[in-house]
Image (cartoon, rainbow, N blue to C red):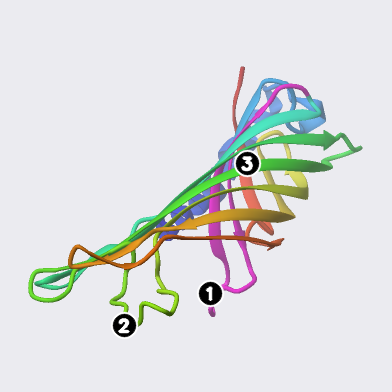
Amino acid sequence: MRKQLMLLTALLLISCPIFAQDESTEEGSSGGMAGAGDFLFEVTGTPFNTGGSLLNFSEFRARYFITEEMAVRLGMEMDLNNNQQTPDLVINDSYYGLMPGFEYHFVNEGSFRSYAAADLMFGQRIASRKSSTGPTVLGAASLPNNPSSFVSNRGYTQFGGRVSIGAEYYFGKRFYIGGEIGFQYINRNNKEVFVDGESFQDATKSSFGYLNTTNAFKIGFRFLNF
């Protein structure tokens, strides 16, 4: 999924000259910025906690402006990781999330604008370790060894909310870059873990909040106007 997001970003950059050609003939929204009826796509990422990479990509997001000040959005993230590590062992450790939200924009002079946003957050991690010659684990992606200790690499479902502030700069009528930082609170239901069909560890619940920097950088373009 990360490679696909990197490819999408490259396509956005390549498309900039094409978008620039339209600026002499297309009437802009909000003096070049997004306005009512505009439909935009963007990808977000962070330069923090990248494990040596320049940038880790986070969300693919669609945005629709109801007015110049208000927009609705839908963020999506997905990490599909279903690997056959040996002929008799398949490990699935996949995640997907959906983040519907709302933005209120403070219309500024020029091409710069700032906004506040709120999102609902829903996600699921699917984890299993299936083997034809050894133990099969459902609810976790690794083989647990102690039922009294919390099993790592565990599957879960979660929901929560996020509030953020952001800013963006528009290069003409199509292309923009920006950033966003916020705080999110998550309620997580960890899956029950089974080993060879027998319950190994009961389901658990947890709640936590933290500063979110996964959308600290974003790049996007205006796709359509309705």
Question: What segment carries the magenta color?
Answer: 41-67
Q: Do labels 3 and 2 touch, CB within 8 Å?
A: no
Instruction: Say which residue label 3 marks.
Output: 120
Q: Amino acid at mark 3?
A: Leu
Quadrant of residue 74 in the image? Answer: top right
Q: Residue furthest top?
A: 226
**For residue 22, which quarter of the picture?**
top right
Name the secondary structure under disc 2.
loop
Q: Which mark is residue 145?
A: 2
User: Mark 1: few, some, or many residues within 10 Å (few <14, many ≥20)?
Assistant: few
Is 222 rendered above or below residue 130? above
| Residue in front for this viewpoint, 155 or 7 | 155
Q: Secondary structure at mark 3?
A: strand
Viewport quadrant of the N terminus? bottom left
| Foreground disc of the pair 1, 2 | 2
- The residue sitting at 60% across, 59% down in the picture is 45
- Residue 91 visible in the displayed image: no
User: Above or below — where is 78 with respect to 130?
Assistant: above
Image spot of residue 6 (x, y percent): 48, 57
In screen coordinates, is 195 left or right of 19? left
Q: Nearer the viewer, mark 1 or mark 3?
A: 3
Which residue is depicted at the point 31% across and 82% down? 145
How far across and down, in percent of the image, does residue 44 sit?
A: 60, 53
Quarter that holds the C terminus: top right
Query: Crowding at label 3, few (<14), some or many (≥20) Cα neighbours within 10 Å?
Result: some
Q: Residues within 10 Å of mark 2 (few under 14, many from 20)?
A: few
Q: Is residue 139 left or right of residue 10?
A: left
- Residue at numbered disc 1: 53
In screen coordinates, is 17 left or right of 81?
right
Q: Residue furthest bottom?
A: 145
